[in-house]
Amino acid sequence: MKISCKEASSICDKSQYKEASFWDIVKLRFHLIHCKVCRGYSKKNSELTSLCDRAGLTMLSEDDKKKMKRDLKERNP
């Protein structure tokens, strides 16, 4: 059940976007009990997500991303 700090940070990132599985979250919780550094990372990650939510930041849609890539390729062949 033990995971590395690298895996813990990856699961932490996924959980912020509701992409982590139940078992990943369980493993992360056990890791956070013992790892002060990862607890700090998780706390800061949660704060950042909260700030972004409150600021109303949005991401580009997939169509907008594709259009932007096409435009950039046309400008810089």
Image (cartoon, rainbow, N blue to C red):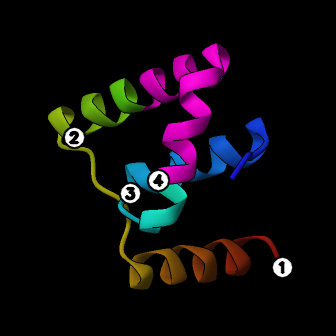
Q: Is residue 68 above or below residue 67?
A: above
First along the sequence among labels 3 and 2 = 3
Magenta-drawn stretch contains 31:
yes
Q: Amino acid at mark 3?
A: Tyr
**How busy is the neighbourhood of tag 4: few (under 14 within 10 Å), some, or many (20 plus)?**
some
Q: Dot 4 corresponds to which residue?
A: 25
Give the magenta range.
26-45
Q: Position of residue 48 (x, y in %)?
A: 38, 28
Q: Is residue 76 above or below residue 31?
A: below
Mark in front: 2 vs 1: 2
Q: Toward which corner of the image does residue 19 lie, by quadrant? A: bottom left
Q: Which mark is residue 17?
A: 3
Secondary structure of the residue carrying tag 1 is: loop
**Distance Cα–Cα, label 2 vs label 1:** 37 Å
Mark in front: 3 vs 1: 3
Mark in front: 3 vs 4: 4
Q: Residue at x 53, y 73 (%)?
A: 68
- Callout 3–callout 2 Cβ contact below 8 Å: no
First along the sequence among labels 2 and 1 = 2
